[in-house]
Amino acid sequence: MRLVDKRTRLSRRDFLATGGAAALVVGTGSLAAPSGAWSMEVTTLQPATMRTLIQVSRDIYPHDRLADHAYATALAPYDAASAEDVSLKQLLESGVTDLNAKTKAAHGVEYVQVGWEGQRVALLQSVETTEFFQKLRGDLLSGLYNNQAIWPKFGYEGASADKGGYLERGFDDIDWV
Amino acid sequence: MATQFDKDDASLAVVVGSGAGGGTLATALAQAGIKTVVLEAGPRYEIEDFVNDEWEMFNKISWLDKRTTSGSWQVARDFPNLPAWIVKAVGGTSIHWAGASLRMQDHELKAASTYGDVKGANLLDWPITLADLEPYYAKAEARMGVTRTNDIPGLPGNNNFKVLKAGADKLGYKKCHSGRMAVNSQPRDGRNACQQIGFCLQGCKMGAKWSTLYAEIPKGEATGNLEVRPDAQVLTIEHDAQGKVSAVVYADKSGQLQRQKARIVAVAGNSIESPRLLLNSSSSTFPDGLANSSGQVGRNYMRHMTGSVYAIFERPVHMYRGTTMAGIVTDESVNAPNRGFVGGYEMETVALGLPFLAAFLQPGAWGRDFTSAMDSYDHMAGMWLVGEDMPQESNKVSLHASEKDKHGMAIPNVHYDDHANDLAMRAHAYERGRALYDAVGAVRTFPTPPYPSTHNLGTNRMSEKSDDGVVNKWGQAHDVENLFVSDGSQFTTGGAENPTLTIVALALRQADYIRDQMAKGAL
Ligand SMILES: Cc1cc2nc3c(=O)[nH]c(=O)nc-3n(C[C@H](O)[C@H](O)[C@H](O)COP(=O)(O)OP(=O)(O)OC[C@H]3O[C@@H](n4cnc5c(N)ncnc54)[C@H](O)[C@@H]3O)c2cc1C
Ligand code: SF4
């Protein structure tokens, strides 16, 4: 059968960018991958807030084959939206502050510094019903999975009408049933 | 130049809604020489405007005006403001539908007599039988080009179908094929053959799938007897001193109110909007809403027993390639009460793209349990389970006590409690679905809960007697002789089958009746 190539079609440098948000370099008004492969400007939210949101997002929808960049892309619209909407900014900033407070009480460090995924997930479970968590989860659902750039990683091919559909491209090519 | 009728022309048939029911009725009336205007709440898109993108199309053409929900159904928890997936555009939900076109069975039209007394169910026999419907089923199948009828070959089975078929064979099911689909397996009626694009639920770019948008309405317009007025949401239906309907009031694109006079009015806004409109049209003569002397308007809301089973296999499937629903097992759509419930269900292939699967596989889920399933997206097969649910008087569409839409019309609330029979059927269907996939070596299976309702039925039901329902066997209101209901809200009971073929057959039958009654001067 015709398979979808799931290899990352990016430079080696970018490939190296995969990793936990703790490694991201936080500057004034920006975040960057340690390799320098990508960076992100933030003007309304605190860069440290964005870094935490990236880690929280990965912990909500963990896909080991996705680089941090995929989560950052899903979250990027929050920065501009927060400029327009003070209550959104407040929700995100205070959500992260509360999560960090909980984390400090339990582990003595901030959320992104908790090294074990299991411990971070337990923290998220304790805030699962908050408006902060539910808003983030709901927005990620489309922000993450509706990003065409990551579809090949899942073997999804997206639009097909422009390629003539699958009539000649494997609609019935299953070879194991 | 497209036909334009005068708003003061009181000789017109006015049809509310241009979907499967309204679009077909209006076209058939125009073809019979009856001047008809369709008022459609949504805009008019054409095939060029369709895109192969799930969220983009959803956001572009769905009915997203606020609705509320109540009741024990899981949809109320997962999608509290989206009880139903319905299109607001010329063509209605026939743009998004998958095309599965099945006839109801004789016993399903006699649900009360066949199933007997089912506690809590408001069962009734239809006032028509399969024999009454058969000639119109035949007409509808020919018109829509349903595969496996009229010598039209079946569609070729795609990967998702092949998995279904292999499992069905292993379980000993005898009736599994690539479906009766209103999708061209070969060019027909000026429309292309299916190219296996796989975005059937986003609008068919080939025009291979029947939709009133391009397979009916243009034919009606070509007669010069049909005007389709988009961006026209009907807010109330008015009547004269004799209690006959005389006009409708609608909001145009700019929100201005307009009044269109009418000789007859046919309501086809789908089973949430149609009762909403009747309830919103109360007057001193009809204090509980138009045509509601029975108190049944909005009640007996049905949405089919539904659910899906997705399964992950060791090897790839690519379920998203090809026609979304061209695959069916009909062995379970019999009435065999020894299974622990009355009525039956169908098992049909279904595939969602990655974005929709993320939203619908396990609504609300997060963490590795969920994402590990998504990681196996290309190794998944999927089926949709659809069966008869019980009409219950308390399951209803009603007007919200305080909230109004932008035109000042009360928004609808949709209340639904699963009946014990529905729950027993769903449990059985999930189990059989899992067994089917297990038989082909599934490594993990998921019982996916119902999506927002795609099949909305029963809220203006047909009945022999005027105190049991809203319309008679022609879909004509018991209380108002020149008012008709022309969509799935007429259904007395739901049957196991996807409803659209029956909606179209009823619309064609109603068109003949209206033509004959007008010719006799009775309307
Ligand atoms: C994803 C999906 C897949 C489906 N697949 C199948 C399938 O395979 N087989 C099958 O049989 N069925 C299927 N269905 C169901 C099918 O689409 C419906 O049964 C059918 O379209 C209902 O026809 P209708 O005329 O009652 O309503 P619709 O087609 O929904 O049309 C109603 C129209 O009325 C308009 N309207 C509503 N209120 C007003 C108002 N007040 N004023 C003016 N206009 C108004 C709406 O905007 C809409 O355009 C599917 C549905 C969905 C969503
Ligand atoms: S698979 Fe066939 S029916 Fe479905 S959208 Fe494509 S061409 Fe149309």
Image: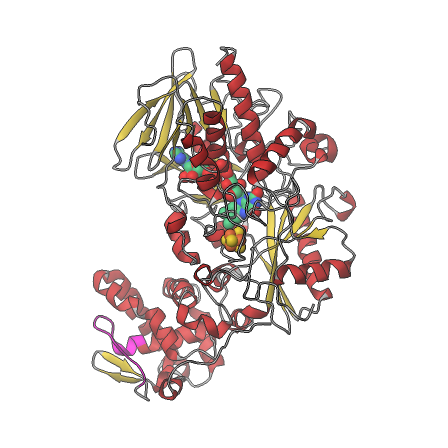
Residue B104: give x, y in percent of width and height.
66, 37
Residue closer to the observer: A29 or B224: B224
| Residue occupying the point 21% across, 78% down | A29
In which image quadrant can residue A174 be found? bottom right
Q: Image height check: is B433 above or below B501? A: below
Q: State left or right for residue A90 relative to residue B291.
A: left
Q: Is residue B425 left or right of residue B245?
A: right
Q: Nearer the viewer, residue B396 or A25?
A: A25
Task: For the N terminus of chain A, give its image quadrant.
Answer: bottom right
Q: Quadrant of the C terminus of chain A?
A: bottom right
Taking depth in this image into account, of B195 and A106 the one nearest to the observer is B195
Residue A41 among those drawn in magenta: yes
Which stretch appears magenta? Answer: A37-50
Of B33 and B241, the residue lying toward us: B33
> Viewed as shown, does residue A86 lie left or right of B325?
left
- Is residue B300 among the parts visible in the rendering? no
Residue A44 lies, in percent from the top left, at 22, 70
Residue B485, compared with residue B157, is above or below; it is: above
**In x, y percent, where is residue B108?**
69, 35
In percent of width and height, residue B306 lies at: 60, 49
Query: Is residue B146 in sight in this rendering?
Result: yes
Q: Is residue B364 magenta?
A: no
